Amino acid sequence: KIKQWALRYGILECIQEVVDISCALVSSNNLGSPKNYRECVEILIKNGYIPEDLGKRLINMIGLRNLLVHEYMKIDLVRLYEFLNNIVNFREFVYYIGIEKG
């Protein structure tokens, strides 16, 4: 149970960092007024901060975040372990944001 909780929390924290950074970039650069986390990423795509394919993957991760936070349904542990194969999305996000921030 502890490992399962750690997996859920670790994934949640990683996704939340992407959300926080995305929304902070939108706000600090006056790129718009997003109504939700998804729109923060959409605005970054629209303004060329991140490529569209990465943005779509991040938006899917935000959906997973919402499931983890609000526990709309029981999350399949296999799905969470498979998510670890997509850790490259976080590295890619940092890469593109790093380019934009100089």
Image (cartoon, rainbow, N blue to C red):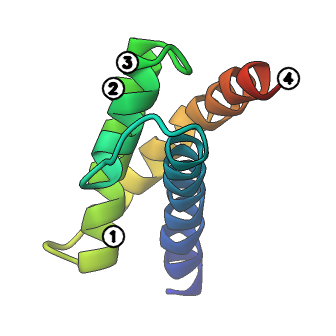
In the image, which is nearer the foreground, mark 4 or mark 2?
4
Q: Position of residue 31 (x, y in %)?
A: 45, 34
Q: Which residue is mark 4?
A: 102
The residue positioned farthest toward the front in the image shown: 30
- Above or below 6: residue 64: above
In the image, which is nearer the foreground, mark 1 or mark 3?
3
Measured Cα–Cα span from mark 4 to mark 3: 19 Å
Q: Nearer the viewer, residue 98 or 16?
A: 98
Q: Position of residue 4 (x, y in %)?
A: 50, 75
Q: Quadrant of the C terminus?
A: top right
User: What SS does tag 4 mark?
Assistant: loop
Measured Cα–Cα span from mark 4 to mark 1: 33 Å
Residue density around tag 2, few if under 14, some if 14–19, many if 20 or more, within 10 Å: some
Earlier-in-chain disc, 4 versus 2: 2
User: What SS does tag 1 mark?
Assistant: helix
Task: Tell me the residue at 37%/39% (across/down).
Answer: 32
In the image, which is nearer the foreground, mark 4 or mark 1?
4
Residue density around tag 1, few if under 14, some if 14–19, many if 20 or more, within 10 Å: some
Amino acid carrying label 3: it is Lys
Q: Which residue is mark 1?
A: 68
Measured Cα–Cα span from mark 3 to mark 2: 12 Å
Earlier-in-chain disc, 3 versus 2: 3
Q: Which residue is mark 2?
A: 56
Q: Position of residue 56 (x, y in %)?
A: 33, 26
Amino acid carrying label 1: it is Leu
Q: Which residue is mark 3?
A: 46
Earlier-in-chain disc, 4 versus 3: 3
